[in-house]
Amino acid sequence: MGTWGTGIFDDDTTCDVRGHYRMALRAGVPGPEATDQILRAYAPGPDPFDTRVWLGLAATQTQLGRLEERVKTKAVELIDSGADLAAWDEADAATRRRRRAALQRLRRRLLGPQRPPVQLKPPWRQDTPLQPGQHLLFRFTDGQQVLLRVLDVQEFFLEATEGTLPVVMLLDWRTGQPLPVGPALDRVPNALRWGALWFSVIRKGPRDGLADRIQVLAGRWPEAPFWSGVNGSSIYTWDELQPY
């Protein structure tokens, strides 16, 4: 679990809770049922020790105008009892003051007037036409290109979008260099980027003009079947592959 600040959503747990709840609403799950899903997944006990689950739920629900009484009651109880601040005992005084202030801001929002319910749109579906073993050139808006190898195609589920995406390997080739063909293309080595040899790529939106910037090359990399199921958990948009 990572924590990077004193705000309510400045840690992995509350961000995961927020994403889970919003994703459930987008899928048409009623709010109370989405809450039940989260409590089963993150806080299985009757009195869970991790206050962040309840605080994340309460903050998310008040943002969306869907604050449930049981969630409000538990979150306010955890704030008033000092249970959350107890986890910050080893922090310095200034950090504890900032956390206390964040908790009090959340408490005021929970006990104040609530906004009308916010309706979240269903996730839009994107399915890649690419296939494992293909090589392709991707052109950025400034004309630069990268050479990619498709290792696998996998299903994915994010809050705002879902479908299938390619897991690609960035190859050691730059715009202006001769483009290898045939067996020479199969032998082009990878180019390390962000400490990763491969990653998944998704579209920004349904009108991103992506199809006009992808050129699929002839042939099929023969080693693709050995890469089926490769971990593609690092996800970027296509334009984030821009070389430095």
Image (cartoon, rainbow, N blue to C red):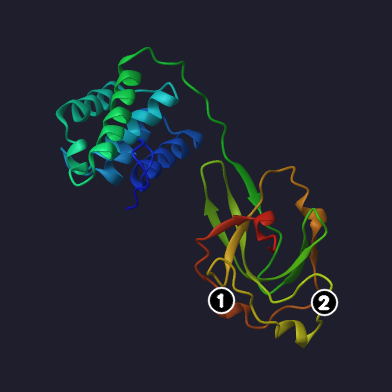
Which quadrant is the C terminus positioned in?
Answer: bottom right
The residue shown at (35%, 20%) is: 109
Q: Nearer the viewer, residue 14 or 123?
A: 14
Residue 227 is tagged as 1
Indicate the secondary structure of the residue bearing disc 2. loop
Q: Nearer the viewer, residue 199 or 32?
A: 199
Tell me the residue that label 2 is attached to: 177
Looking at numbered disc 2 in the image, what kind of residue is underneath it? Gln
Looking at numbered disc 1 in the image, what kind of residue is underneath it? Trp
Residue 77 at x, y percent in the picture? 19, 26
Toward which corner of the image does residue 55 lie, by quadrant?
top left
The residue shown at (71%, 59%) is: 129
Mark nearer the N terminus (2 vs 1): 2
Using residue 137 as the reference point, say whether residue 121 is left or right of it: left
Toward which corner of the image does residue 201 lie, by quadrant?
bottom right
Indicate the secondary structure of the residue bearing disc 1. helix
